[in-house]
Image (cartoon, rainbow, N blue to C red):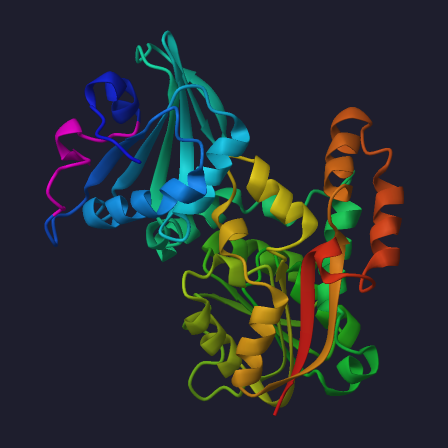
Amino acid sequence: MIAPAKATPIDLVLRDLDLRADRVRTVGDAPAPPGGGSRSALAAVPASEKDGAKTGPELVAFGEAHVAGDGALLVLLEGPREDREIAAFRNALWPFAHVVAIYRMSHGGIVRTTLAGTERLRGGTGISGALLVARRKEIVLAPDATVAKFDQNASGWDGKPGTPGYAHFRWMRRFVGTFAPEDWMRASAERILDFGCGAGWVGIEAALLAGASRVELCAFDPSPEMVRIAGENARASGIARFSARTGFGEDPPFPAEGERPFDLVISSGVVSFAPDSGRWLDGLARTVATGGKLVIGDIHRESKGMRRRRASKPLLPAREMNARTRGEVRSELERRGFVLEAEAGYQISSPVPELMHWSEKRLRGLLHPALLAWNRARAGKGSEDAFDSWVLRFRRR
């Protein structure tokens, strides 16, 4: 049961969000008019209501009626709330909207938490509760938001040589980049495309296996900064022929008119960023030559660790909510004329990621070599849900 909420007590929060109180609608207001621009909506959930799954449909219907443009759905969970409660409400709002910030309010203070960190705001609200700030999925995953995010985080996604986690970072990319058979790579992979290249390491690993002096490696990414870094990494790795462009998977910049499709296309960790995975997979399929191979990998939404994170963490990256399982992706690609050749899970799920984090923070990476050896020995073996990532290899008919 949701209830009306007054904007006045949370005026400090609205100002922090750069939202006008007169553009925040509440329960009982008329629906937002079509084309009304950016509008937000605020609803309260009484402290007695603990079941996010039960209340979720009502909140979604309220948001669909009142939130327009890049406005926000504001959900005030009244009273003290544990992390698992907040996570349940967050899960119930998806896929309509994704929670991007949480304001924990007490009578004398406000603490804002986003994925970038936590900050205490000046002043208070005089009320107790947690305010969830949710944006529509299509806004969170919009092209301009993706480019801005990738440009801002580009250097961090490149990996840092010499740090405790770098060997694991490179192993994950090598596992996907070399998932096609070595003999086929050396004999038949003349043109390789890194589809959503990031820092470029997956495509680079494939090119090094196929033969850095003879293979042509192409790459693209939405982020100009990522494309720049990928080019630097390719040149430093001795890739003789490398070219890169900016673009999105739904309308890939390779192959351009007059260019032929690729012998091998690799995409790692990209489909979970796609707002419409069907359109994205259509774009991916167009880049693979008849008889060519496709290697695709991503995070596994239903792994033991991912399920635990969704149940317990109030804030998550949108891609963890948006991720597809390998079964879903396999079915979609088979309908597009691809034949599965091999599949594997890699990156052991909980507790390995937690142990790596603890090792880095407390032991300066002392346990990292043993944890990497464990990952390498287990990759491709055991239950699908025992791994946080999956990889598939196809041949195009």
Dominant SS type (magenta)? loop
Q: Quadrant of the N terminus?
A: top left
Residue 110 visible? The answer is: yes
Q: Which residues are magenta?
A: 17-32
- Which residue is at 62% across, 47% downward? 307
Q: Nearer the viewer, residue 7 or 58?
A: 58
Q: Nearer the viewer, residue 43 or 145?
A: 43
Residue 63: image x %, image y %? Answer: 26, 45
Tell whether 291 sits left or right of 77.
right
Is 208 contained in the magenta span?
A: no
Q: Residue at x 17, y 28 (%)?
A: 21
User: Residue 245, how many percent across, how many down?
Assistant: 48, 67
Q: How many tags in the picture?
A: 0
- Residue 185, image quadrant: bottom right
Residue 282 versus residue 259: which sits nearer the camera? 282
User: x, y (%) of residue 279?
Assistant: 42, 72
Q: Is residue 251 left or right of residue 386?
A: left
Residue 337 shown left or right of residue 189 in the figure: left
Q: Quadrant of the C terminus?
A: bottom right
Image quadrant of residue 184? bottom right
Q: Residue at x 25, y 44 (%)?
A: 62
Q: Is residue 238 visible?
A: no
Q: Is residue 19 magenta?
A: yes
Residue 105: give x, y in percent of width and height.
Answer: 39, 17
